[in-house]
Amino acid sequence: MSAEVFIDTNVFVHHVDDSDPRKGDIAHALIREAIATGNACISYQVVQEFLNTVVRKAEQPLGIDDAHTYLSEVLAPLCRVYASISLYQNALDIRARYRFGFYDSLIVAAALSAGCSRLLTEDLQHGQRIEGLAVNNPFY
């Protein structure tokens, strides 16, 4: 189950959102490499957040057929971390220790449980280290 990189939801949102071409290009390259090498992963939470964002909240929502295709071709091959009581317990411990929000703590816990050394996200401080996990904002 080990992967080097954990990719947070915002990378996938930039992949389908054309409002910022620079971020879109970076997201395309990251996701293409992740799928090609198999050395990156996501959690069930990323799948849920992405689908909720692109079908309900986006300025130009994805249609259901496109959402199904994206789920099958992009998200499913990368999804390796699923909900468990131990994941929630670890997230609570991370939240208490680092004072992150619960959902950010859940992302960190998922990345750690997958054995990742890097977390790609816009939501945490670029360069921060959390229990051996390096936080990188790929759009920084």
Image: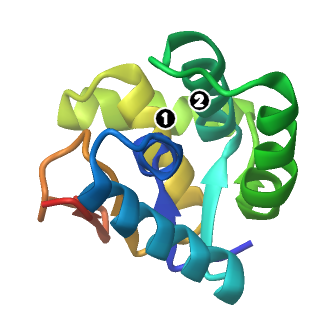
Type of residue at label 1?
Answer: Leu
Instruction: Tell whether 73 sits left or right of 24.
Output: right
Residue 71 in which image quadrant: top right
In percent of width and height, residue 107 lies at 47, 42
Instruction: Tell whether 3 sits left or right of 35.
Output: left
Nearer-the-camera pick, 86 or 16: 16
Instruction: Tell whether 112 sits left or right of 69.
Output: left
Is label 2 or label 1 in front? 1
State the SS at label 2: helix
In percent of width and height, residue 23 lies at 29, 56
Work out whether mark 2 precedes mark 1 in sequence or the reverse, and give the earlier one.
2
Q: Which mark is residue 88?
A: 2
In percent of width and height, residue 88 lies at 59, 29
Q: Quadrant of the N terminus?
A: bottom right
Q: Which mark is residue 119?
A: none
In percent of width and height, residue 60 lies at 52, 22
Q: CA distance from mark 2 to mark 1?
A: 7 Å
Q: Are marks 2 and 1 in contact (CB under 8 Å)?
A: yes
Q: Is residue 70 visible?
A: yes
Nearer-the-camera pick, 132 or 33: 33
Taking the view exactly as shown, the residue that stands out farthest to the bottom is 37
Nearer-the-camera pick, 122 or 73: 73
Type of residue at label 2?
Answer: Tyr
The residue that label 1 is drawn on is 106
Q: Quadrant of the C terminus?
A: bottom left
Q: Is residue 93 visible?
A: no
Nearer-the-camera pick, 8 or 61: 61
